[in-house]
Image: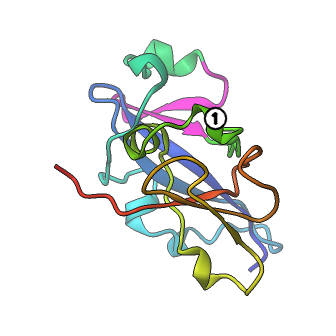
Amino acid sequence: ANAGCEVQVKIDLVSGYIGIVNSLEPDNSGTAEVGQVEDLVSPDTVNFFKSIWENGAHPASLDECLTTSSCYVHGNEYCICNTEVAEDPVFSDTFGISSIDQLMSSLRVGAVNPATFDAGTYNSLGDCGVPGVTMYSKSGDCSGISFDTIFAFDWNSK
């Protein structure tokens, strides 16, 4: 069908844990194909995971949920809100990067191996002054990195 899909987040008001909710828009016939939404991503999902909240603050009451216009209360204990994607780089250059530990504590999204892309898509920049790291970029050098930059390293958890 030609229906759109909106990704929302379901917030547990007590723990701040979140679940993904996919909401279908009506297709060209004017009907939503609700039967195609899996239970794990429906508004009634109980599949939650930990989220990192700015300053540790998440909506903790029904009133706090309703203060955001894109949110609504679901089941008197959950808040469902619209999401939006922001593609902002964590680092704009390598001068502020000092270690693998700093990368691990600052970066939240992983990347696929740059070798899986077509030849020439990513170029190796070397370690750019950060021992144990290889940086890959679509264009540029160590002085200017973007959200497309891939940091490769071996990480051994303690």
User: Range of the magenta residues?
Assistant: 68-82
Quadrant assignment, res 115:
bottom right
In the figure, 129 relative to 72: above or below?
below
Q: Position of residue 106 (x, y in %)?
A: 47, 37
Q: Is residue 28 left or right of residue 10?
A: right
Give, as a three-letter code, the residue at label 1: Phe
Question: How many numbered markers are drawn?
Answer: 1
Q: Is residue 20 left or right of residue 93?
A: left
76 inside magenta stretch: yes
In the figure, 90 relative to 35: above or below?
above
Q: Position of residue 84 (x, y in %)?
A: 68, 42
48 inside magenta stretch: no
Main SS of residues in magenta? strand
The residue carrying mark 1 is: 95
Q: Position of residue 97 (x, y in %)?
A: 54, 37
Residue at the image point whose x is 75% and y is 44% from the top:
143
Residue at the image point whose x is 48% and y is 14% from the top:
64
Q: Residues within 10 Å of mark 1 (few under 14, many from 20)?
A: few
Quadrant assignment, res 15:
top left
Residue at the image point whose x is 40% and y is 48% from the top:
19
Which residue, as the protein is rendered here, is positioned at the far left? Answer: 158
Q: Quadrant of the N terminus?
A: bottom right
The residue closer to the viewer here, 134 or 40, is 134
SS class, disc 1 = helix
Q: Position of residue 81 (x, y in %)?
A: 56, 36
Display coloring: rainbow
Residue at the image point whose x is 79% and y is 75% from the top:
2
